[in-house]
Image (spheres, grey):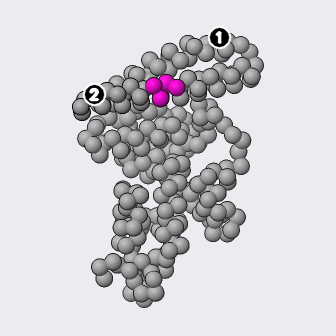
Amino acid sequence: MGSRTLKKGYLSIGAVVDSLTPEFPDLSISKVRYLEDEGLLDPKRSKGGYRRFTEDDVITLRLILSMQKEQYLPLKVIREKIREVSKGRLSAGDLMSGKDDKTEVTHELTDKTKKMTSDEASEATGLSSRDIQELVTYGLIESAPGEKGTAFDAGNVRVMHLVRALGKHGVEPRHLRMYENFAERESSFLTQIVAPIMLQKGDDARMRAVETLEDLASLSKELRETLLTNKLRDAIE
């Protein structure tokens, strides 16, 4: 059964993993089994007890993995969203476009509503609790009190994902301290620019400060990336 395609068009768990690995390199058979144990997947079973995945199962799995990867959502939240899709209350497109959020548009600098516990962050990013604590020690991420203990907002979880990706190239957290130093210096510089606006009273002034900072951050990011590209180009010529 080379392709691991079963009778009547069903797929084996190995075939499912093979089909999605190009999009999600960290996917493994054990992770698919874990998602099933957590109630996010419900593949049919053969008489011999083997899992038989349908095309709809694969679509659901891709949706789950995408929400983990792009939105950093804990499994309990993803589970509820998948149930909404199964009941026809939402479409997969709505989930990926964020149309189900039912919240007002927020600015990235002020939106810290999405938080994960340490265990949820570990589950979402693939980092161990020890790895996460190491990032805290190096000042690369910050925790905050949450309803269930220590929590991390979406920005900090994003850092965890990036650290995990860099780790595949042999980059260790201790090598990344320079980025924290750069970010601290750049943050101080940009906040000095908007300091006069922040001294003004009222929500309008605060919003103008946020919007100005976001614009400055975007321009600064583009400048950094361009300068880095130029340096790398020089290095390989």
Q: Quadrant of residue 132?
A: top left
**Mark 2 / mark 1, whichever is N-terminal:** 1
Residue 234 shows which numbered tag?
2
Question: Does the stretch in magenta take in 211?
Answer: no
Residue bounds of the magenta highlight: 219-223
Residue 122 percent across, percent down from the top left: 42, 48
Is residue 138 visible in the rendered image? The answer is no
Q: Is residue 174 left or right of residue 140?
A: left
Residue 177 percent across, percent down from the top left: 34, 27
At mark 2, the secondary structure is helix
- Quarter that holds the C terminus: top left
Residue to which mark 1 is pinned: 196
Magenta part, dominant SS: helix
**Where 23 sits versus 51, above or below?**
above
2 vs 1, front mark: 2
Q: Quadrant of residue 16?
A: bottom left
Identify the amino acid type marked 2.
Answer: Asp
Is residue 199 visible in the rendered image? The answer is yes
User: What crowding class fits label 1: few (fewer than 14 Cα within 10 Å), some (14-19), or many (20 or more)?
Assistant: few
Along the line of sight, the residue nearer the viewer: 211 or 125: 211
Residue 184 percent across, percent down from the top left: 45, 21
**Where 58 sits versus 121, above or below?**
below
Name the residue at 29% across, 79% down: 2
> How many numbered marks appear?
2
Question: Does the stretch in magenta take in 222?
Answer: yes
